[in-house]
Image: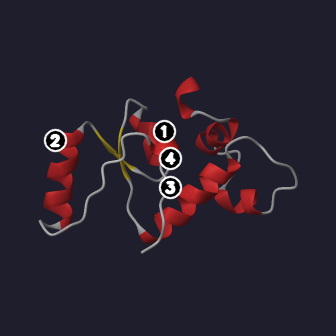
Amino acid sequence: MGGLGSETFQKLIDGRITPEKIKNASKYEDGMENLLYMSEVQKNSQIALASILPELYVKKLGMIPLDGIKKSMDYILKNQGPRQKVQVIEDGARTLLRPN
């Protein structure tokens, strides 16, 4: 349970909140901006996650769960083709993404 990183993500997993409700929230909760950022990125991109988080959590976050880098690359090549751009982010907490 402690692996999610914030109460907002835990509420999302439990079904107590949605990204739409966060946009109109009257008070700030830790992690709100991360959930909003993730939902905006997911509008234009597919996110696959190689993590030790349980598969159920990853799916509820709207991501594709993968077991490791090798399986991740196999998935991308099989489903997206060999001419895909891939970015491996080792430390997502210290990474800023910008739209192309």
- Local secondary structure at mark 3: loop
Between 47 and 15, the one lying in front of the other is 47
Kindly identify the residue that appears in the image at 36 percent across and 47 percent down: 89
Q: Earlier in the sequence, mark 1 or mark 2?
A: 1
Q: Are marks 4 and 1 in contact (CB under 8 Å)?
A: yes
Instruction: Assess disc 2: are there few (<14), some (14-19) or many (≥20) residues with their C-alpha within 10 Å of its C-alpha.
Output: few
Q: Are marks 4 and 3 in contact (CB under 8 Å)?
A: no
Pointer 2: what residue? Answer: 70
Distance of label 1 from label 3 (alpha carbons): 23 Å
Kindly identify the residue that appears in the image at 69 percent across and 36 percent down: 7
Q: Nearer the viewer, mark 4 or mark 3?
A: 3
Distance of label 1 from label 2 (alpha carbons): 21 Å
- Amino acid, disc 1: Tyr
Q: Is residue 71 above or below residue 4?
A: below
- Determine whether, in the image, residue 37 is placed left or right of residue 71: right
- Amino acid, disc 2: Lys
Numbered tag placed on residue 57 in the rendering? 1
Between 37 and 46, the one lying in front of the other is 37
Q: Are marks 1 and 3 in contact (CB under 8 Å)?
A: no
- Local secondary structure at mark 4: helix
Numbered tag placed on residue 38 in the rendering? none
Q: Quadrant of the C terminus?
A: bottom left
- Local secondary structure at mark 2: helix
- Amino acid, disc 4: Lys
Does any portion of residue 18 appear in the rendered image?
yes
Instruction: Assess disc 3: are there few (<14), some (14-19) or many (≥20) residues with their C-alpha within 10 Å of its C-alpha.
Output: few
Number of numbered markers: 4
Pointer 3: what residue? Answer: 96
Please identify the residue farthest to the right as the structure is shown.
26
